[in-house]
């Protein structure tokens, strides 16, 4: 079964957490969270220095996240902007 198909069929946050816990190491999960946090901060117009200080992300990884926001497939932008809009309501 395809990885993306599996994730698209999950019904709850708890199911996602359980699958990630079995699929990834704690460090891998933490790094993904760090990238998401950094993407949100970039969308909120924080500076690189502020983001690095707040998240402890490397400048190289932060640069990659920034490039993905600007030129990527839209994953960060579409998903995170949608969630941020919902949270503001």
Image (cartoon, rainbow, N blue to C red):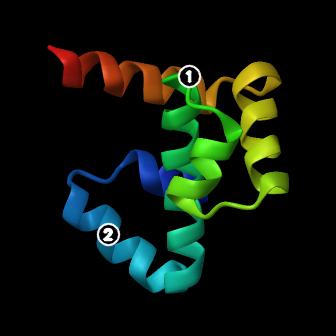
Comparing 74 with 87, the one in front is 87
- Image location of residue 24, percent across then percent down: 54, 80
Q: Residue at x 59, y 75 (%)?
A: 28
- Residue 21 drawn above or below residue 89: below
Q: Residue at x 49, y 59 (%)?
A: 33
Image quarter of residue 2: bottom right
Viewer-nearest of discs 2 and 1: 1
Q: Is 14 positioned to the left or the right of 70 in the image?
A: left
Check whether the beta carbons of the residues at disc 2 and disc 1 lie within 8 A of each other.
no
The residue at which mark 1 appears reads as 45
- Image location of residue 44, percent across then percent down: 48, 24
Which image quarter is the C terminus in? Answer: top left
The residue at which mark 2 appears reads as 17
Q: Earlier in the sequence, mark 2 or mark 1?
A: 2
- Residue 57 drawn above or below residue 38: below
Dot 2, crowdedness within 10 Å: few (<14), some or many (≥20)? few
Image quarter of residue 1: bottom right
Q: Residue at x 49, y 48 (%)?
A: 37
Q: Is 78 positioned to the left or the right of 17 in the image?
A: right
Image quarter of residue 64: top right
Disc 2 to disc 1, C-alpha distance: 29 Å
- Residue 30 drawn above or below residue 82: below
- Image location of residue 47, percent across then percent down: 64, 33
- Residue 28 drawn above or below residue 71: below
Comparing 78 with 27, the one in front is 27
- Image location of residue 81, percent across then percent down: 44, 20
Q: Is 43 positioned to the left or the right of 12 in the image?
A: right
């Amino acid at each position: 079964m395809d990885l993306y198909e599996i994730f698209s069929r999950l019904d709850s946050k708890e199911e996602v957490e359980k699958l990630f816990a079995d699929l990834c190491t704690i460090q891998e999960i933490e790094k993904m969270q760090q990238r998401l946090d950094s993407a949100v901060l970039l969308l909120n117009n924080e500076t690189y220095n502020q983001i690095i200080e707040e998240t402890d992300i490397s400048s190289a990884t932060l640069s990659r996240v920034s490039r993905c926001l600007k030129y990527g497939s839209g994953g960060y932008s579409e998903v995170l902007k949608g969630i941020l809009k919902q949270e503001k309501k």
